[in-house]
Image (tube, grey):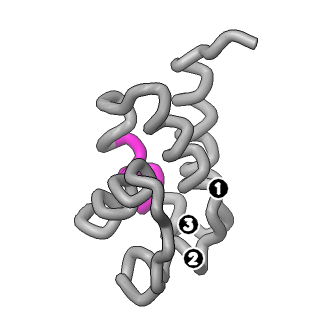
Amino acid sequence: MTFNKEDLKNKIIYRASYRGTKEMDILMTAFVKSLINDLDENFLKTLDSFVNMDDETLISIKKKESLINYKDEKILHIIDKFQKFK
């Protein structure tokens, strides 16, 4: 299967936009759109995993309440950007 960067970007934006709660839709869509065009294939795949986390986990990460046990530098980079995103 060939990698299509634009298809993955569209999938991520769609998932960020339809989360279940309007507040999280707005937050995740704005966050994703703020960085999606600057990411390479590996970071896009990581962002895809990130936007597929449940809302409670993402809120906990945003509030820095969650004890994050990730070792992958890419996910830590995405989490750092998410926590700093206003």
Query: Distance between the Cα atoms at labels 3 and 1?
Result: 16 Å
Q: Secondary structure at mark 3?
A: helix
The residue that label 1 is drawn on is 52
The amino acid beneath tag 2 is: Thr
Q: Residues within 10 Å of mark 1 (few under 14, many from 20)?
A: some
Q: How many marks?
A: 3
Q: Residue 50 falls in which quadrant of the image?
A: bottom right
The residue that label 3 is drawn on is 22
Q: Secondary structure at mark 2?
A: helix
Discs 2, 3 touching: Cβ within 8 Å: no
- In this picture, which residue range is highlighted in magenta? 27-33
Mark found first going from the N terminus, 2 or 3:
3
Residue at image location 53% in from the left, 19% down from the top: 5
User: Which quarter of the rendering shows the C terminus?
Assistant: bottom left
In this rendering, position of residue 59 left or right of residue 37 = right
The amino acid beneath tag 3 is: Lys
The amino acid beneath tag 1 is: Asn
Question: Is residue 44 in the magenta section?
Answer: no
